[in-house]
Amino acid sequence: MSTPVFSASELTKDELQAKQRLVIVASSLGTVFEWYDFYIYGSLAVFFAGLFFPPGNPVTALLTSLLTFGVGFVVRPFGALFFGRIGDLVGRKYTFLITITVMGLSTALIGVLPTFSTIGWVAPIILFLLRVTQGLALGGEYGGAATYVAEHATQGKRGLYTSWIQTTATLGLFLSLAVIVICRHSLSADDFKSWGWRIPFLLSVVLLGISIYIRLKLQESPLFMEMKAEGKGSRAPLRDSFLKLPNAKYVWLALFGATAGQGVVWYTGQFHALFFLQNALSLKDYTTAYELIGISLLIGTPFFIFFGWLSDRIGRKGIIMAGCLLAALTYFPLFHQLTKCVNPALNEALKKAPIVVSGADGPDLDKVKADLNSRGYSFAVKPPQGGSGLTVSIGSTQLQGYDAKALGTALAAAGYPKTADPAKINFPGTILTLFILVLYVTMVYGPIAAFLVELFPTEIRYTSMSFPYHIGNGIFGGLLPFIAVAVSVATGNIYAGLWYPIIVALVTFVIGMLFVPETKNRDLRA
């Protein structure tokens, strides 16, 4: 039996519980606000395509917007290394005070950034740099919060306590969606497009003030203070994490056997689902799209706590691996079900009048593909038949060459809708499908903080756990929206992008089952 973090002589049971509640609330609330800051961009990524990037090609603008969104994730591992080292050398508390300040200020600056129409290419360049700053800050935030909470938790409750940190990413996304919906309902479409979109970003100044006030009330982690008092801290956390065994081995096992799969499952169930609704399924009513995602998140969020609690009883590894496997096996039918529920007219048209494009590479083929991609219609591309040139088949109808007007007329005649009709959405079916996607997220994400904290010793915990977490979530997960949309655009198949998270989740399942240890009974003081 390990020694409690706080001895009975120091704190009564009620005092211990009160202090642990403060630690959880302060760490979680600050992290919610930080995720809010980070996700505001993601929630408005489709909208940003027309604000900060050059007009003329909506598909290119969307991909550039998504790539800029992904950049914030790509740099997160560098933030993990930089701030993780500080956290292991100086302390957990002061490090994540710095990260939340950097995040809040970066977000507020996006709220006052002039658009492309005002300052041209300077706008996307500054936006890119602010996304980089956000990513660096977030790279240091999560590891600090998770480590801080875990080092305050008593044995047997780390999964439960750290699962509150795991809710913060989803709650941050939910908060960002809620703020955007309120703004869009409160303002006219023209006002929101002109200046109202800035409100969610500027609100981060208020959230930053609240976060700093609460976190200043916290004390340093007791395990960190004990380690420093005993002179056991690492003088080179980066070297000890990545160049010394067995820690170096566990860093890479944590990445490929846990966080890579967790990252793609997370971002498929939240961001790719949102982009899929708005683009592939042409749900142009942004409020409806946000509400559908928001309701599914609201229903699913308690399961983060449930699976964190369950991991204290049956182990972390099995729950994470089950989530990866279930996601990989069911993504295709679930996203087909989304099409059926959200845009039934499109679903019927794809069945009755499939689109096939055949022709040699050239300008006309590129134009047809760009046209169909911009409409969100799934199509197949085949080699040209002899010397027939470019042919577009829509069911039994065939068009020779590319004529935008003729193509639009033929698609309409075949029943292809321009946009999804909100009145025809099967709301119960859609929310159930989205909830299942979120449920997979809670399975892989609920226990992951406790798993990572328990995998590494105190002197290098902040650095060692942050790096694989942010590689898995920042690169494997953060680039998912861009990769998935890019694959779908290249192939013409709106579902083809799902192969990316499926393959990564399966690789994680295999490596995790074969090589990753169970951690739930480990003593953090060992």
Image (cartoon, helix red, strand yellow):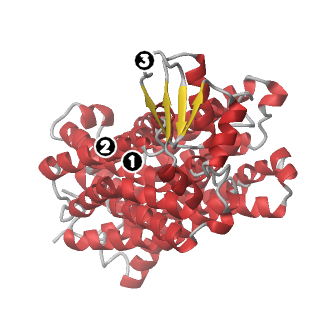
Residue 22 in view, yes or no: no
Kind of residue indicated by mark 2: Val
Left or right of 11 on screen, residue 291: right
Cα–Cα span, label 2 and label 1? 7 Å
Q: Residues within 10 Å of mark 3 (few under 14, many from 20)?
A: few
Left or right of 60 on screen, residue 276: left
Q: Which mark is residue 6?
A: none
Kind of residue indicated by mark 3: Gly
Q: Position of residue 312 (x, y in %)?
A: 26, 71
| SS of the residue under disc 3 | loop
Image height check: is 234 above or below 171?
above
Image height check: is 53 above or below 336?
above
Point out the frontmost of discs 3 and 1: 3
Q: Are marks 2 and 1 in contact (CB under 8 Å)?
A: yes
Residue 467 in view, yes or no: yes
Tell me the residue that label 2 is attached to. 504
Q: Quadrant of the C terminus?
A: bottom left
